[in-house]
Amino acid sequence: MRPRTLDEVTGQDHLLAPGAPLAALIASGHLPSLVFWGPPGVGKTTLARLLSTVTDARFLTLSAVLAGVKDIRAAVEQAQAILPQRTVLFIDEIHRFNKSQQDALLPFVESGALTLIGATTENPSFELNSALLSRLRVMVLKALDVEVLEGLVRRALVDAERGLGQSPGALPDTVLRQIAEAADGDGRRALILLETVVAGQSAGVALDEDGLQRLIGRGLRRFDKQGEQFYDQISALHKSVRGSDPDAALYWLARMLDGGCDPGYLIRRVTRMASEDIGLADPRALPLCIAAWEAYDRQGSPEGELAIAEVVVYLACAPKSNAAYTAYKAARQAVQNGGTADVPMHLRNAPTRLMKDLGYGQGYQYDPDSEGGHAQTQTYWPDGMAPQTFYQPVSRGLEIRIAEKLAQLRARRAGR
């Protein structure tokens, strides 16, 4: 059922509709080197084949899983042997090439000895080196939506030449819809599921809820444990917590757990959220994260995942403040911009007689013994360094009270 013409390609109108980027390149007759980036089963290989056809180019293909520099050179020799006819070299899983293998492509792409089309499921920004990426145009392919997949399986069901050659009513519309939904954007998976359902029906499996569950199985969602989808989803979880949306936060937490993400990683990141986004607006958030972490360590999955979910909801509902986080970054910047300032003598430790004789610790005022528990005239900054203000509490949660107390202390220290 692979499309035989560009008109048969569906689901990528943003590239192939009149005036769209890929359609414009085809119309111009100029085919530059490209990289197709998208999830599995959306037509990356198909588009590469069709582009070679419409540009009257020879089509060579390599898999980066198996090929090496020797194979690249052999492909270039084949391309040069048929000049001036154009050659399209399609490299599937191009992100699996290491740096030296990618570098081996550079002179041939640069000289125009061949037109390179790479296919990848990973973000080219991270997986392709900058020298190669600068010579390629990136085309982003989208996952196929349910309507496109439903149309695909419907055509495959009745196509007598390349499909299953069944009658139009061989499968109910509801079953075709379930197949399309279970495929989760992957055309290849949709066709495999269609074959499975038709074979099961022929074997006498009833296409009721239980029968379809056995044939189709549990739907699988796209996820990777190291690539862009992983970091996109943890970003969505973090921003949902920061945006005080507990329902969205739970959704992204469940998505990551469903994809096989390590719950230990998740609770570590959630604990960071407590310090970064809630801070002293609700100081209970951090110890609750530690408690959830301990609960997960003791219970494991799936029982311990509930503790993570509970604390995610709490953080999303808590008042937000990044004042402590911002203050810490400002303090680090001040340290990096300054020299090695000595600790003032009155703040130094004096564990030995010699150090006391040298003046270590002399003049220190013990705050608990001072009036109001605060030595108002004492400074805690290096000599010659003007006091700075890093921490600015926000007017939310407990930091409202903290701000009031700090204002009093700073006014006293300034002699106001």
Image (spheres, rainbow, N blue to C red):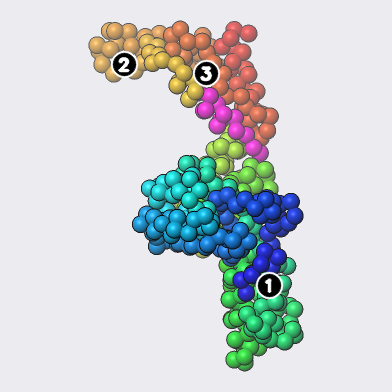
Task: Check the image and report above or below for 162 versus 250.
Answer: below
Which residue carries the number 1 mark? 152
**Is residue 394 or residue 78 the one in the foreground?**
78
- Residue 185 percent location from the top left of the image: 63, 64
Q: Residues within 10 Å of mark 1 (few under 14, many from 20)?
A: many
**Residue 274 lies in magenta, yes or no?**
no
Which residue carries the number 3 mark? 373
Name which residue type carries label 2. Answer: Ala
Quarter of the figure with residue 297: bottom left
Magenta segment range? Answer: 317-331
Quarter of the figure with residue 358: top left
Q: Could you tell which of marks 2 and 1 lies nearer the N-terminus?
A: 1
Residue displayed at 73% across by 56% down: 17
Q: Secondary structure at mark 2?
A: loop
Which residue carries the number 2 mark? 350
Q: Could you tell which of marks 2 and 3 lies nearer the N-terminus?
A: 2
